[in-house]
Image: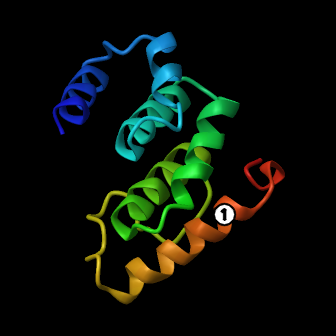
């Protein structure tokens, strides 16, 4: 939890350098750390490693992580996954959350050509 909080703080203040962001994409890191790094890298432009990490994270069987991943994919890659931008995330046990989770998992299993 401390690593996640510190990473969020560094990312929010623009203090994560690119080499560190790329190291955080490693599958050995926790999904929230990888998600923070992927979003930071995609905020600067397209990044194949970040997209690969997002696909890996989206395959995890965790609805909260799936919703957070869908938010990043939708905002940074422009893929409509059913979230309303600028609005709070749907409750985890809602029908909308289940639908978004299914969509992000489907996106994760598609090829890289689906991103463009």
Horizontal relation, residue 107 to residue 36: left or right: right
Q: Residue at x 29, y 84 (%)?
A: 93
Identify which residue, 12 or 55, lies in the foreground: 55
Query: Residue 63's spot in the image, x, y percent?
Result: 39, 70
Q: Dot 1 corresponds to which residue?
A: 107
Q: Residue furthest bottom?
A: 95
Place residue 103 in its image quadrant: bottom right
What residue is at 48 percent from the left and 74 percent from the top?
100
Q: Name which residue lies at 56% across and 47% down.
A: 54
Q: Is residue 115 above or below residue 33?
A: below
Most extreme residue toward the front is: 28
Q: Left or right of 42: which side holds 109?
A: right
Counting every numbered tag in the picture gives 1
Q: Residue at x 49, y 13 (%)?
A: 18
Q: Does residue 84 appear to the left or right of 107 in the view shown?
A: left
State the image quarter where residue 67 is shown. bottom left
Q: Residues within 10 Å of mark 1 (few under 14, many from 20)?
A: many
Q: From the top left corner, tell me how far across and down residue 36 is, in percent.
A: 39, 36
Nearest the camera: 104 or 28? 28
**Residue 56 screen position, x and y as percent:** 59, 50
Check the image and tell me how it is coloured. rainbow
In the image, is residue 55 above or below residue 20?
below
Instruction: Locate the N terminus by quadrant.
Output: top left
Please provide percent x and percent y for residue 2: 16, 32
- Helix, strand or loop at label 1? It is helix
């Amino acid at each position: 939890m401390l690593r996640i909080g510190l990473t969020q703080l560094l990312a929010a203040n623009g203090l994560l350098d690119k080499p560190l962001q790329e190291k955080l994409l490693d599958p050995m890191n926790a999904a929230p750390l990888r998600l923070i790094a992927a979003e930071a890298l995609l905020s600067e432009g397209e990044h194949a490693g970040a997209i690969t990490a997002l696909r890996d994270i989206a395959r995890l069987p965790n609805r909260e992580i799936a919703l957070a991943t869908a938010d990043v994919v939708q905002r940074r890659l422009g893929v409509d996954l059913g979230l309303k931008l600028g609005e709070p995330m749907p409750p985890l046990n809602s029908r909308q959350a289940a639908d978004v989770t299914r969509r992000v998992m489907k996106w994760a299993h598609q090829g890289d050509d689906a991103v463009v």
